[in-house]
Image (spheres, rainbow, N blue to C red):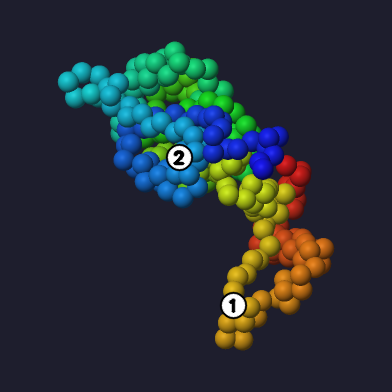
Amino acid sequence: MKNSNIRNYDYFCIIMRIDIITVLPELLESPLSHSIIKRARAKSLAEIVIHDLRTYGKGKYLQTDDYSFGGDAGMVMMIEPVYNLLEDLKKDRLYDEILYTSPDGELFSQKEANRLSCLQNIIILCGHYKGIDQRIRDHLITKEISIGDYVLSGGELAAAVITDALVRLLPGALSDETSALTDSFQDGLLAPPIYTRPANFRGWKVPEVLLCGDPVKIRTWQEEKSLDRTERLRPDLLKNNSGD
Ligand code: ADE
């Protein structure tokens, strides 16, 4: 019999809604339609709605960008379509964060993914063109996020990365709920090496301890390896390690 104290996430209501605003919806469809995200959407743990900003574009050509004042080269995302779309979204629910993907933003991290995954409704506005009208950033956005110190052609891939990192954290999204907690970075360390069958492939052997069946010994070995890998590959994590 099922334990009635345990939530059955197959029938659980939506935990998180993510609205993504973009001028290139096609770029987001595939990354958000497979594997863990697909399952989380199918189980209604996450509702992800992609909005084509062009449907709010101005005039006959549904314009969403224009030349910049001051004559710099490059087109700039206009404020009106963004404002109108946000106003429509806000009519239906309260949003906890309105994020803008930009190389200027705060560097995305597991800590930030954990924080965002506890929110209920978020919007991600994907940057495009040369940039967006500064008034969008000043008045409509609550936070800017960068996924790394490099420049992408647009914010869609960054939005997909952020969405993936959040959705996999939702309870019930992973088949084994503990596995998100053992991800690299969750305890400020890289994950230990893992192996599967065969135990011996052309003389390349799986470490003996993993075959011994003693969970304490295995856990101790994994912790040592985690620390070891972090020291070797990402010593910066140990310096900044605040445990969250
Ligand atoms: N848009 C362009 N480059 C980006 C980056 N590195 N992170 C987030 N959004 C971006």
Q: Which residue is mark 2?
A: 42
Tell me residue 219's x, y (percent).
78, 62
Q: In the image, 166: left or right of 182?
A: left
Q: In the image, 225: left or right of 138?
A: right
Q: In the image, 19: left or right of 68?
A: right
Residue at image location 67% in from the left, 58% down from the top: 191
Residue 5 occupies which quadrant of the picture? Answer: top right
Between discs 2 and 1, the one toward the N terminus = 2
Tell me residue 17's x, y (percent).
50, 29
Q: Nearer the viewer, residue 35 or 125?
A: 35
Query: Which of the image's four quarters has the C terminus?
Result: top right
SS label for mark 2: helix
Q: Which residue is mark 1?
A: 198
SS label for mark 1: loop
| Type of amino acid at the residue the image marks with label 2 | Ala
Residue at image location 41% in from the left, 31% down from the top: 49
